[in-house]
Image (cartoon, grey):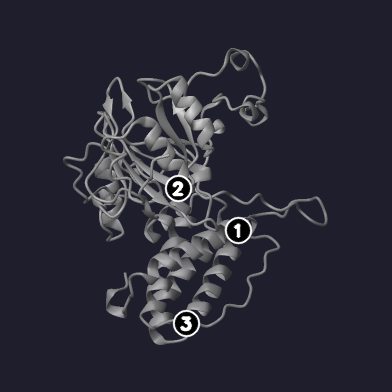
Amino acid sequence: MPVYSESLPHAVSGGSALDVATWLALRGYPVHPLAPGAKTPAANCPDCRGAHHSPAACPCHAEGRWCHGFHAATTDLRTLRRWWRAEPGFGIGVSCGPARLVVIDVDAHPAPLPDRRKLLPGIPVDDRVDLTGLRNGYDTLALLAAYRSRPHPCEDASTLRVRTPSGGMHIWYRVPQDGPAFRSSSGSGSRAALAWQVDVRAVGGYIVAPTTRTAAGVYEALPGARVPAALPLWLTAELVRTGHAPDEAPPAPEGPSEAPRGPLAGRRSPARPAVRGKAGRRLLGPLLDDVRACGAAPAGTAFSEKLNRAAFTAGGLAAAGHLDHGEGRLLLLEAADHARPHQQRRNRLIVEAGLRAGSDRPIHPKECP
């Protein structure tokens, strides 16, 4: 058995597919084979092609077969050796959910530019913003980073970045075991999307590993880190804001079955704790009011964006000493649960992500928007 280093310098540049698959498995990343020369999973066995069982119930997995793509992904080295010895031309897929990976998939496909309202879901792009030259996911991800005053993730050499044969980029990040289990999405999706032509590969998806060769070319690791870095806090907040964290189902109604009349009927606004400090009252107060005001309508109020903005500001104020961190969290949750009482778990995710992201950038009164 060869010795595999921590940084994968050889495997990503000249090792065999089995070398790369083994290294990934040793790090705890479940892998599965891709069809030779393609980026799609290897074909199911004849029995599974005509069967109607669910991937989770497939008996082939217990027998070490690769049916159903990422559902068959494994870290078992004997199974991997058997797969790649059977077909050395297999490419390598990594099941993102079990691997605790979030991969930002930046596309560079030629396509007509959509309405500016669809470039950054939940963020209105002002008409004064010049969109000349904006062509693809590289540009919209750069725009999102600029809105948040953060570095462009495509230039993040601290994490593994992979150039795709089509000219796109995969930016690999890892999330902690106790962090949110983010879902996958498409950059043109209607339910969850980070930016136009920017996909997210996470739970329910897989990513093509570097060195995999397809008919279009090779997935090539770019200069810089050879392992995924921790998902930046500001991107964590953006993923929560844009619906990539799992929703909590609304609780079953209690008491009489007749529904209340109007979105605020029967709801009592809890007492609002005071924000200590002039800076806290002046800067955070209006943002909290914006969040509470979303309770007047069940949708269409940019609630997640407003809550994320308030949480980010609270985190920055706390980091600069202008707000008690615990008090800020209490205020945010009070406002959020007043406006959206049926999704308290998601409210907490947005608040915690926003507070963590904001704490990385202290805000003093003159800096606060």
Query: Please, is residue 186 above or below residue 38 in the view?
Result: below
Q: Are marks 2 and 1 in contact (CB under 8 Å)?
A: no
Task: Tell which residue pokes out farthest to the bottom in this image.
Answer: 277
Label 2 vs label 3, nearer the camera: 2
Q: Foreground: 212 or 305? A: 212
Q: Are marks 1 and 3 in contact (CB under 8 Å)?
A: no
| Kind of residue at disc 2 | Arg
Residue 87 % position (x, y): 43, 20
Q: Residues within 10 Å of mark 2 (few under 14, many from 20)?
A: few
Distance from the alpha carbon under mark 2 to that under mark 1: 31 Å
User: Who comes first in sequence, dot 1 or dot 3?
Assistant: 3
- Residue 150 at least partly seen: yes
Q: Is residue 38 left or right of residue 276?
A: left
Query: Please, is residue 32 above or below residue 368 in the view?
Result: above
| Quadrant assignment, res 68 | top right
| Kind of residue at disc 1 | Arg
Q: Residues within 10 Å of mark 3 (few under 14, many from 20)?
A: some
Q: Foreground: 105 or 303? A: 105
**Residue position marked by numbered label 2 in the rendering:** 27
Judged from the image, the secondary structure of the residue bearing numbered disc 1 is: helix
Judged from the image, the secondary structure of the residue bearing numbered disc 2 is: loop
**Residue position marked by numbered label 3 in the rendering:** 324
- Residue 186 at least partly seen: no
Judged from the image, the secondary structure of the residue bearing numbered disc 3 is: loop
Residue 352 % position (x, y): 50, 65
Q: Foreground: 175 or 86? A: 86
Q: Residue at x 44, y 61 (%)?
A: 308
Task: Tell which residue pokes out farthest to the left in this image.
Answer: 133
| Kind of residue at disc 3 | Asp
Give the quadrant of the C terminus. bottom left
**Residue position marked by numbered label 1 in the rendering:** 345
| Quadrant assignment, res 287 | bottom left
